[in-house]
Amino acid sequence: MTASASAPSPATQNPASPMRLGVMASGKGSNFVAIARAIADGTLNATIAVVIYNNPNAGVAARARDFGIPAVLVNHREFAQRQDCDRAIVKVLQEKAVELVVMAGWMRRVTQVAIDAYPHRMLNIHPSLLPDFPGLHPVKQALDCGVKFSGCTVHWVTLAVDSGPIVQQAVVPVLPDDTEESLQARIQVEEHRIYPEAIAIAARQLRNTPSEPPA
Ligand code: GRF
């Protein structure tokens, strides 16, 4: 059986049933917490089946356990090839019957292995108004450029980094005395608001038009 053959098909799901999410995170996990809270307070019809993290000390693992959600370490340093690491990730996602993958501060490029297993079913959040400032240090890039407005973007994941079709964005004004830290903090407030919204939009697209790419 291939990786993609065993992935759950949204077409077979009851449109009203909670979307099964798999969260992938590398850091402290504030976006994970925002999503878990939106589910807990009933504003997002979803369930988080698993959190996958790649850094042994990532704070997100403890946050997941606070919510009673299994956290699985897939440490990329233990794999010779990126593809092997992605195969291990896909295995965990499929074992947990994940329908929609949510990258929340996942600081690794994905390979075709992951894209093939979850085509048009992986979301990412990036702290800039894409297509501006993809890649590393987007908040610093924005400040260095002198833009007056920045923000954050939730987009579908494609092989090219931070480049897939956009699902949701929020604008954050840049203040004259902003530092990377102060601007990042205000952008994160908006990230926590729009990521649950974007997941709801994505879930509707997947459930309502399962055979169409949700571009
Ligand atoms: C977020 O700012 C996200 O945009 C970026 O990584 C950060 C993750 O933060 N890709 P957290 O771990 O969710 O707090």
Image: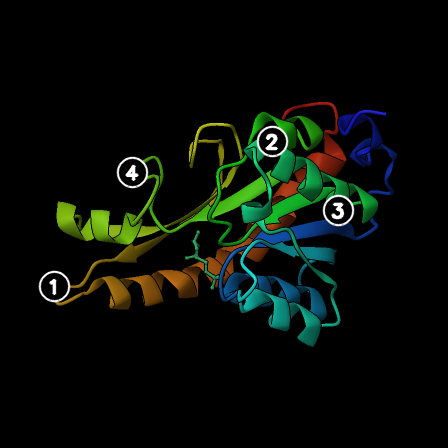
Secondary structure of the residue carrying tag 4 is loop
Q: Quadrant of ligand 1?
A: bottom left
Spatial distance from mark 1 to mark 2, Cα to Cα? 44 Å
Q: Which mark is residue 132?
A: 4
Ranked by sequence position, the earlier of labels 1 and 2 is 2
Spatial distance from mark 3 to mark 1, Cα to Cα? 45 Å
Secondary structure of the residue carrying tag 2 is helix
The residue sitting at 27% across, 66% down in the picture is 181
Spatial distance from mark 2 to mark 4, Cα to Cα? 28 Å
Q: Amino acid at mark 1?
A: Pro
Q: Amino acid at mark 4?
A: Asp
Which marked residue is nearer to the observer: mark 3 or mark 2? Answer: 2
Spatial distance from mark 1 to mark 4, Cα to Cα? 20 Å
Q: Amino acid at mark 2?
A: Gln
> Residue 183 is drawn in which quadrant?
bottom left
- Whether pointer 3 and pointer 1 mark residues with C-beta atoms closer than 8 Å, the reply is no
- Does 103 sit above or below residue 55? above
Q: Which mark is residue 83?
A: 2
Q: Amino acid at mark 3?
A: Val
- Does 38 sit above or below residue 125? below
Which marked residue is nearer to the observer: mark 4 or mark 3? Answer: 3
